[in-house]
């Protein structure tokens, strides 16, 4: 008989370095990664968490299900191309899709600060419902809490989601293999720069709109066509750089990418230069990376190019064989450098 592992009372995180939580611990960069890997995962240690996936896959009644949750605290609540409500649906739908699941049901937990305009709350709820309908999911349970004026910040939303995994293959970091091509589904950095442009009061010639969108459709299109997909991950906080670093570490293989192939819109590039950001570290909310074996690249890109949200999909690199599990960027002038995760302090409360 094996007893459950005893609860370990000693905190495994080096608290002396950070006696208090910083905003950067939620920024999607190195500090958040350390917090999760050294404190949160060990606290709840189990085989499902160790999948290190956007959603956990488990079996119930002979069916494989995917389960995920995410909280949304973006400021401002309304921004070009989206709002807190649609984001809270798209983010959770996308985490289910990244596990190859068909998203089915969502929960909605609302934490509302006293004083929020009833009209704003209604706009957020209506937007959630529109996004859910468009993504083919239903919000079937929820919770509402109100906190004192000044003790919250408008509205926070948590959504959890359940989906069903219908195919037998495993789409997960552990399925990444040397030689796999790395694809991105469209232009990078737009969500983060749409938010930052509003916060900084910047006016560009054309307004930068968030790319916030559901990705379950283009994932389903690949699977329905029988494309062999090894891994998928949506590009959110920390941008492409964080996603690739997480997947290099989780798979144990180096990832080689080329700067010249990175799809970044000109207005986003300019906004990044003005505000001092690297577009590869800026969040998207409707983009993903896909790992497919070489013979599947052409077919995968052809399928994605025919769907609006993935029309800008391109190949940006491949998975290497030996060496440390790092991300290596070949610059436009041919030099190679390691693409490290940022600390995460630059872009707080982006989603
Ligand atoms: Mg994700």
Image (tube, rainbow, N blue to C red):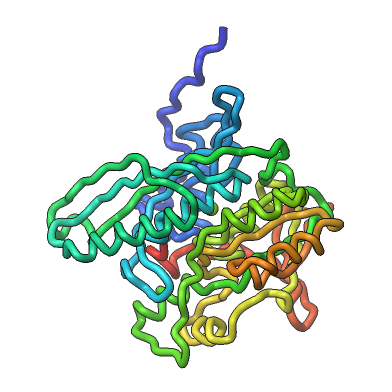
Q: Where is residue 110 in the image (x, y as percent from the top left)?
A: 27, 50
Residue sitting at 17 percent across and 50 percent down?
147
Q: Where is residue 242 in the image (x, y as percent from the top left)?
A: 58, 60
Q: Is residue 200 found left or right of 150 in the rendered image?
A: right
Q: Is residue 22 visible?
A: no
Relative to 252, does residue 215 appear above or below in the rendering? below
Q: Residue furthest bottom?
A: 205
* Quadrant where the image shows the N terminus: top right
Relative to 341, does residue 232 appear above or below in the rendering? above
Residue sitting at 75 percent across and 56 percent down?
254
Residue sitting at 47 percent across and 32 percent down?
44
Relative to 9, does residue 113 appear above or below in the rendering? below
* Quadrant where the image shows the C terminus: bottom left
In the image, 1 versus 12, the foreground residue is 1
Relative to 281, does residue 52 appear above or below in the rendering? above
Q: Where is residue 13 in the image (x, y as percent from the top left)?
A: 46, 43
Q: Can residue 202 be seen in this view?
A: yes
Q: Quadrant of residue 167?
A: top right
How many numbered marks are there? Answer: 0
Q: Is residue 100 found left or right of 120 in the rendered image?
A: right
Q: Is residue 112 found left or right of 133 in the rendered image?
A: left
């Amino acid at each position: 008989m094996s007893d459950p592992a005893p609860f370990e009372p000693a905190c495994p995180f080096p608290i002396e370095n950070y006696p208090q939580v910083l905003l950067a611990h939620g920024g999607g960069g190195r500090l958040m990664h350390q917090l999760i890997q050294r404190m949160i995962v060990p606290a709840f240690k189990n085989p499902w968490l160790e999948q290190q996936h956007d959603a956990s896959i488990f079996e119930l009644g002979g069916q494989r299900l995917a389960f995920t949750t995410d909280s949304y605290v973006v400021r401002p609540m309304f921004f070009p191309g989206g709002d807190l409500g649609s984001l809270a649906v798209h983010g959770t739908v996308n985490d289910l899709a990244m596990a190859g699941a068909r998203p089915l049901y969502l929960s909605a937990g609302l934490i509302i600060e006293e004083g929020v305009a009833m009209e704003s709350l209604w706009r957020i709820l209506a937007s959630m419902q529109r996004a859910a309908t468009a993504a083919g999911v239903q919000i079937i349970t929820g919770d509402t809490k109100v906190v004192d004026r000044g003790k919250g910040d408008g509205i926070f939303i948590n959504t959890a989601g359940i989906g069903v995994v219908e195919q037998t293959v495993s789409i997960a970091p552990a399925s990444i293999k040397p030689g796999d091509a790395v694809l991105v589904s469209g232009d990078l950095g737009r969500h983060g720069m749409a938010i930052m442009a509003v916060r900084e009061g910047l006016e560009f010639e054309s307004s930068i709109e968030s790319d916030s969108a559901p990705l379950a459709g283009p994932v389903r299109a690949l699977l329905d066509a029988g494309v062999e997909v090894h891994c998928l991950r949506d590009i959110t906080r920390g941008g492409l750089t964080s996603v690739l670093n997480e997947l290099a570490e989780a798979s144990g293989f180096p990832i080689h990418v080329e700067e010249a192939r990175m799809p970044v819109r000109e207005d986003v590039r300019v906004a990044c230069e003005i505000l001092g950001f690297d577009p590869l570290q800026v969040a998207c909310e409707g983009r993903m990376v896909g790992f497919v074996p070489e013979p599947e690249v052409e077919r995968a890109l052809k399928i994605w190019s025919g769907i609006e949200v993935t029309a800008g999909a391109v190949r940006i690199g491949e998975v290497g064989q030996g060496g440390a599990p790092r991300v290596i960027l070949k610059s436009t002038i041919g030099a190679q450098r390691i693409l490290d995760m940022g600390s995460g302090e630059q872009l707080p409360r982006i989603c």
